[in-house]
Image (cartoon, grey):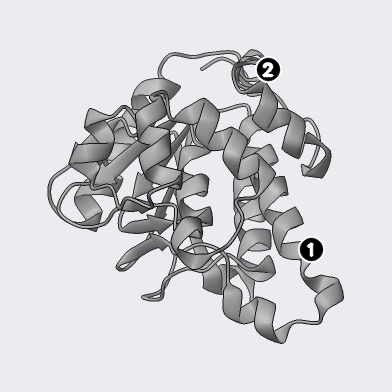
């Protein structure tokens, strides 16, 4: 399947909107991760980036079915691909917003948290770190991402050690997401694009923004930096 069949890219004003397409649960496998990385790389000249998804799921995490059928020597490509995507987002010289339009579980939850801001659908969907229920160890950079992006220790405990499924209202109350938006997928995407436009209007120097982001989340950056695409071209002031 080609990248264009996995995600769609459009411009809305100064915002580069990436949408994971289809009605499935958007499991992260090497093909989808490569498509997302290509779309993210193309956004370096925009004012801001928004990542959204169609259907019931934002992302239901790693593609375990792919793991069961792929040769063992290829298994590391999925972990490496996701590390690289997180590195790309941290090094991107534009603000980033996740439009969590549906359920975001495990790696899907981590993907949402890798953005500068998270806008979540209030009427449907939850954040869920499913590893404790599935009996799977949390990958090292997941743990650092959650430690640095979830400010409250009790919230981190409930997310990773109790496997709580957090609604948008609960996640906002606990400081994990920035906004809970009523309505459907389109309303969430519109709110995320509006937030991205607001950030783009600040006219920040892209290179400085990327370096501050890496300095703000140093342990995550330290775990993923060797997997990314390297320095992106800085965005000029708007």
Q: Is residue 114 left or right of residue 172?
A: right
Q: Nearer the viewer, residue 75 or 204?
A: 75
Q: Quadrant of residue 88?
A: top right
**Above or below, comparing residue 7 to residue 40 in the picture:** below
Residue position marked by numbered label 1 in the rendering: 76
In the displayed image of the protein, which residue is found farthest to the right?
Answer: 73
Q: Nearer the viewer, residue 182 or 144?
A: 144
Q: Is residue 219 left or right of residue 10?
A: right
Q: Nearer the viewer, residue 126 or 20?
A: 126
Rendered location of residue 13, percent (x, y): 39, 37
**Above or below, comparing residue 24 to residue 128 in the picture:** below
> Local crowd at mark 1 within 10 Å, few (<14), some, or many (≥20)?
few
**Above or below, comparing residue 82 to residue 143 in the picture:** below
Rendered location of residue 92, percent (x, y): 64, 32
From this viewpoint, is residue 43 visible?
A: no
Q: Quadrant of residue 23?
A: bottom left
**Disc 2 versus disc 1: distance between alpha carbons?**
28 Å
From this viewpoint, is residue 172 visible?
A: yes
Residue position marked by numbered label 2 in the rendering: 211
Element type where label 1 sits in the image: helix
Element type where label 2 sits in the image: helix
Residue visible at 30% across and 47% down? 189
Q: Quadrant of residue 76?
A: bottom right
């Amino acid at each position: 399947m080609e990248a264009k069949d996995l995600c769609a890219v459009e411009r809305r004003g100064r915002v580069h909107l990436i949408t994971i397409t289809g009605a499935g649960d958007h499991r992260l496998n090497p093909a989808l991760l490569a498509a997302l990385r290509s779309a993210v790389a193309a956004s370096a000249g925009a004012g801001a980036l928004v990542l959204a998804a169609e259907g019931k799921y934002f992302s239901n995490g790693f593609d375990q079915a792919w793991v069961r059928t792929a040769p063992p020597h290829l298994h590391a490509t999925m972990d490496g691909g996701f590390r690289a995507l997180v590195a790309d987002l941290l090094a991107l010289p534009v603000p980033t917003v996740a439009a969590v339009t549906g359920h975001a579980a495990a790696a899907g939850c981590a993907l949402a948290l890798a953005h500068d801001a998270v806008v979540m659908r209030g009427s449907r969907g939850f954040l869920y770190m499913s590893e404790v229920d599935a009996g799977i160890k949390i990958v090292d950079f997941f743990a650092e991402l959650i430690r640095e992006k979830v400010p409250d220790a009790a919230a981190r405990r409930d997310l990773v050690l109790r496997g709580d499924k957090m609604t948008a209202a609960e996640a906002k109350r606990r400081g994990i997401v920035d906004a809970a938006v009523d309505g459907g997928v389109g309303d969430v995407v519109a709110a995320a694009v509006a937030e991205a436009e607001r950030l783009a209007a600040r006219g920040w120097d892209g290179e400085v923004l990327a370096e501050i982001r890496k300095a703000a989340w140093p342990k995550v950056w330290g775990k993923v930096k060797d997997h990314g695409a390297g320095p992106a071209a800085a965005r000029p002031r708007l």
